[in-house]
Amino acid sequence: MVGVRNLLRNAVLAAVYVVLTVGLEAFSYGPVQVRVSEALTLLAFCSPHYVPGLVLGCFLANIMSPFGITDMVVGTAATFLAVYGMRFCPNVFVASLLPVVFNGVIIGAELAYLAALPPGMPMAAAMVYIGLGEFLSVSVIGVLLLKVLMKSSRLRALFEAK
């Protein structure tokens, strides 16, 4: 991908991420969340050119987070670490585990730091809940969706764009 085409793909990806996150707000924020938009992170496994759109989408979606600037910085950093690392993964399932681990640990710790956990919920439980939501979004929904989409040679060519 070069130039304008790369910019447009990333802009559309960021917009779709934001719409999915904010549109499903009840599931997207808090100590128990299934952020459906995170299924899109697997596009970074297909091509590292999608990293900017995913990171920008996460940042913009976190503007609406009840945790404010902290989530904009910390949450976006967790997503960046996950999608950047996908280029080094041997297969899509292993790549799908990066958001599970990074978001589980980092967002769980962020919520504990912000005292945004329900009374009596330990930080480890928040990490597990966030990780389970990521597993459902990315490792289950995302992997299945990507496998279906990659059966089409046209879509595969689009998503694996160089």
Image (cartoon, rainbow, N blue to C red):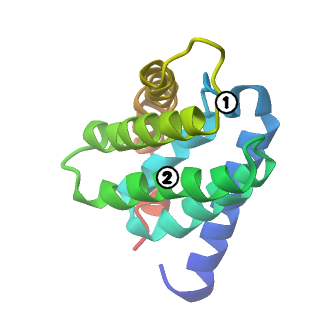
Residue drawn at the location 63% of the way across and 24% of the way down? 117
Which picture quadrant has residue 11? Answer: bottom right
Q: Using residue 68 as the reference point, say whether residue 129 is left or right of it.
A: left
Q: Is residue 90 above or below residue 103?
A: below
Q: Position of residue 6 (x, y in %)?
A: 56, 77
Tag on residue 2? none
Please give the residue where the numbered disc 2 appears in the rendered image.
Answer: 79
Lower position in the chain sequence, tag 2 or tag 1:
2
Q: Position of residue 156 (x, y in %)?
A: 42, 54
Secondary structure at numbered mark 1: loop
Residue drawn at the location 55% of the way across and 53% of the way down? 74
Residue drawn at the location 71% of the way across and 41% of the way down? 21
Residue drawn at the location 81% of the way across and 37% of the way down? 23
| Whether residue 78 can be seen here | yes
Is the residue marked by circle 2 packed among few (<14), some (14-19), or many (20+) residues within 10 Å?
many
Secondary structure at numbered mark 2: helix
Q: Residue furthest top?
A: 120
Q: Position of residue 159 (x, y in %)?
A: 47, 58
Q: Quadrant of the C terminus?
A: bottom left
